[in-house]
Amino acid sequence: MSRVFQAVSEHARLRPDAIALQGADEALSYAGLIERVKACSSGLSRTGLHAFGLLADNGIDWAVADLAALFGDQLLVPLPPFFSPQQLQHAIRDSGLEAILTDQPERVTTLLSGQVERVDAAYAGNLSLLRLTQASTVRVPARTAKITYTSGTTGNPKGVCLSRMAMENVAQSLCQATAAVPEDRHLGLLPLPTLLENIGGIYVPLLAGATACVLPLQQVGLSGAAALDTAVMLRAMHRQCASTAIMVPQMLHALTAAIGMGAPAPANLRFVAVGGAPVSPSLLQNAARLGVPVFEGYGLSECASVVAVNTPGANVPGSVGRPLPHVKVRFAEDGEIRVGGAVFEGYLGLPEQPDSDGMWATGDTGYLDEQGYLHLTGRKKNMFITSFGRNVAPEWVERELTIQPAIAQAAVFGEARPWNVAVIVPRPLPGQDVAQSVAGAVAAANTLLPDYARIKCWLLATEPFTPQNGLLTTNGRLRRAEIASLYSQNIDQLYKETQA
């Protein structure tokens, strides 16, 4: 049986009136949560279906549906609300969903026109259950309890197949490492389909007998994948008396900027985990100076989210902390980090899977210091991570740009930045102004991309990328480091001018 559900049952027996979930307009006790989860699980079982998607805003209904699937051994596929229509369609077909639980039924019926029918689901709270009339048959690894889709390392994000054991191993270790206690109030600031928030923001508080505050995203200041209202976020942290939270670097930057300008710091905060993208050491130092108890960590979906994290009693800034108790870490000859202990079952429909020894090659390089802290030194692949924690493969965005007639070549950058920039080699069009035609082309390409992958600013290259000038390989691949170096001052100026 699920360890999370066992913990919830025990808390319901010992402290039935303690608040398990705090929503926007409702608080659910541990006793009430057990009843809701059992009712929802029973209702899902009666449908005779097995694979359910979950497309909904943060809230109690999302958490209950997630726990019901965990309890009832249904396969759950959280669908990120910030995915583009194309990405959602891919995830739905790729995972072989038979039905979708959603608070956005109109969006789903538009997306899957003529392919869904509504099924009575009073047990799901305010969520509607839409059954797919043309569900595809997909082979899923036997132990898969959840398929989490990344925010898009390519145009079609990969489905990461996770067992219940892997997710709960991470949750148990996080509960221990962060010293979670019943008095905690965790405020979810990230979308719950984000695996880190799902595990750290629901499973960990419930294991500890604490309260998970699951407010709609707009009530914590987040819209889309990258739009943040700092004042709303701060107000929610104060009102909910948040003691713990998970942030991406851009959120921490906004929080420290507000506090630095005189906004009162949330008084109850004891642990803010920051991760999902590289974190600037100066940002961590500034947060510490302002009294924000922030701790950097590291993880990836293929390892069921968190691998390592700093803690109050074991914190080395510049590292991503010590590996969690269940984690095994090894290193390849080239320094690539290999992780075991709670790894995925494989990618859906793709051959990549953990090694025969249960280890996964992360694509990141690093080392363990003498005290056992993990340090990251780089990434083996081209993919970058924005400061909002969204994975972006530049080739994907560049492909959308260069299919536009006005753009001959493009190099996209955005590592640890709030938005992406492109260095563009134009293709002059007869009778058209180059700058105007490129602007139109970028706007057109952006309509095909989710918001976190779009190009906000761009600059024109001074010359084409060629093997002769060292900006292109002989087989036609961009030399990204060389392009970034050549245009670094111009790129930095774009960020300065736009942020000013």
Image: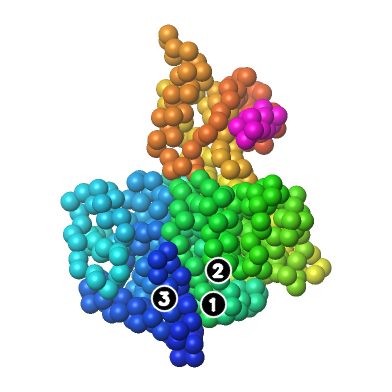
Question: On the image, numbered disc 2 is attached to which residue?
Answer: 186
Q: Which mark is residue 341?
A: none
Position of the C terminus by quadrant: top right
Horizontal side of residue 48 vs 460, given as left or right: left
The amino acid beneath tag 2 is: His
Of 398 and 420, nearer the camera is 420
Which residue is drawn at the image coordinates 70% and 69% (left, top)?
311
The amino acid beneath tag 3 is: Leu
Mark toward the viewer: 3 or 1:
3
Considering every residue shown, the one lying at the far right of the view is 370
Question: On the image, numbered disc 1 is attached to which residue?
Answer: 210
Residue 453 drawn at (x, y percent): 49, 41
Q: Are marks 2 and 1 in contact (CB under 8 Å)?
A: yes
Of 224 and 29, nearer the camera is 29
Which residue is drawn at the image coordinates 44% and 35% (left, top)?
446
Mark 3: secondary structure:
strand
How packed mark 2 is, by other alpha carbons closer than 10 Å (few <14, some 14-19, many 20 or more), is: many
Of 109 and 268, nearer the camera is 268
Mark 2: secondary structure:
strand
Horizontal side of residue 496 vs 195, given as left or right: right
Mark 1: secondary structure:
loop
Tell me if I can see residue 395 in this picture. yes
Magenta stretch bounds = 488-500
Task: Compute the Cα span from label 2 to label 1.
Answer: 8 Å
Mark toward the viewer: 2 or 3:
3
Residue 309 drawn at (x, y percent): 67, 66
Residue 436 drawn at (x, y percent): 47, 18
Question: On the image, numbered disc 3 is attached to which residue?
Answer: 28
Q: Based on the displayed image, in which of its 4 quarters is residue 52 positioned? A: bottom left
Q: Is residue 322 above or below residue 247?
A: below
Q: Main secondary structure of the magenta part?
A: helix
The amino acid beneath tag 1 is: Ala
